[in-house]
């Protein structure tokens, strides 16, 4: 008599696909690219596992304050179509940079990475971390940048219901001791790693050196369901 075969229901026993595993944290890590898209006049920010061409390679803002102020604040959102759980070390890897029209003056840039939950009405803070400070060392009129790796510790289990959104916020903070025009700070966010297309000179807009990446990635630790 043949042995009966038990067929699994659709989806039963399926194994999720992750870029790599963190066995100590018990998580499967998915790498998301941060990029931009633009319809008509408004540019927005998104997360994707695909390395698409972003609408813009970098974003910068003028910095004229002698004390550190927030000059950029961008939300990268990922809406979940099914319940998810995250816990562990989330990493954000990207380049920050600046340019200045005044030589020999202190110009500093750093980033704050925030992890939040957005339910469509309320934004709930989960964890955050601040990067090291990039102190400008280059001469005036040219880009000066560095690639940073920021670890955000999500120490407690975070549950997301269907329809809720993981929101990762990038804040750029900067200060410039001379307070003159022509000082700019920002960061790169192009999944295809194109060079910063900005120009150099007295009205320069290039902030990321060609030797530094313009890719922005987030390594998100999802709890593995056994």
Image (cartoon, rainbow, N blue to C red):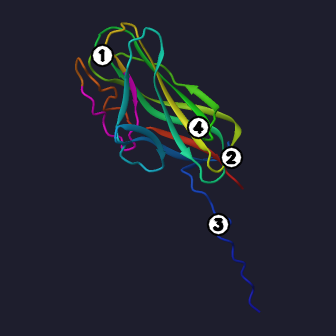
Disc sitting over residue 90 in the figure: 4
Bounds of the magenta segment: 185-199
User: How far across and down, in percent of the image, does residue 39 sit?
Assistant: 37, 43
- Quick one: label 4 or label 2, which is nearer the N terminus? 2
Q: Nearer the viewer, residue 76 or 221?
A: 76
- Tell me: residue 169, above or below residue 52: above
Q: Nearer the viewer, residue 115 or 6?
A: 115
**Whether label 1 touches label 4, CB < 8 Å:** no
Residues at marks 1 and 3, CA–CA distance in whole angstroms: 56 Å
Considering every residue shown, the one lying at the far right of the view is 1
Residues at marks 3 and 2, CA–CA distance in whole angstroms: 22 Å
- The residue that disc 2 covers is 26
- The residue that disc 3 covers is 11
Of tags 3 and 2, the one toward the viewer is 3
User: How far across and down, in percent of the image, does residue 152 sit?
Assistant: 60, 32
**Whether label 3 touches label 2, CB < 8 Å:** no
- Quick one: label 1 or label 3, which is nearer the N terminus? 3
Of tags 4 and 2, the one toward the viewer is 4
- Quick one: label 1 or label 4, which is nearer the N terminus? 4
- The residue that disc 1 covers is 182
**Whether label 4 touches label 2, CB < 8 Å:** no
- Tell me: residue 31, above or below residue 102: below
Magenta stretch: includes residue 164: no
Looking at the image, residue 79 sits to the left or right of residue 160; the answer is left
Q: Residue at x 36, y 8 (%)?
A: 179
Looking at the image, residue 160 sits to the left or right of residue 44; the answer is right
């Amino acid at each position: 008599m043949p042995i009966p075969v038990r067929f699994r229901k659709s989806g039963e026993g399926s194994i999720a696909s992750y870029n790599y595993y963190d066995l100590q944290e018990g998580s499967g890590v998915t790498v998301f690219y941060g990029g931009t898209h633009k319809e008509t006049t408004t540019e927005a920010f998104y997360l994707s596992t695909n390395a698409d061409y972003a609408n813009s390679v970098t974003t910068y803002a003028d910095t004229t304050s002698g004390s550190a102020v927030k000059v950029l604040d961008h939300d990268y959102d990922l809406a979940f179509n099914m319940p998810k759980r995250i816990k562990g070390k989330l990493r954000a890897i990207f380049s920050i940079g600046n340019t200045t029209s005044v030589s020999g003056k202190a110009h500093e840039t750093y980033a704050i990475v925030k992890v939040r939950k957005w339910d469509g009405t309320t934004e709930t803070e989960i964890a955050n971390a601040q990067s090291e400070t990039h102190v400008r060392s280059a001469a005036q009129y040219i880009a000066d940048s560095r690639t940073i790796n920021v670890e955000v510790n999500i120490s407690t289990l975070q549950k997301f219901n269907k329809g809720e959104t993981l929101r990762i916020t990038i804040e750029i903070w900067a200060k410039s001791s001379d307070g003159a025009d022509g000082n700019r700070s920002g960061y790169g966010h192009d999944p295809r790693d194109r060079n910063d297309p900005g120009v150099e000179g007295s009205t320069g807009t290039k902030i990321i050196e060609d030797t530094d990446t313009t890719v922005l990635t987030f390594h998100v630790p999802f709890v593995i369901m056994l």
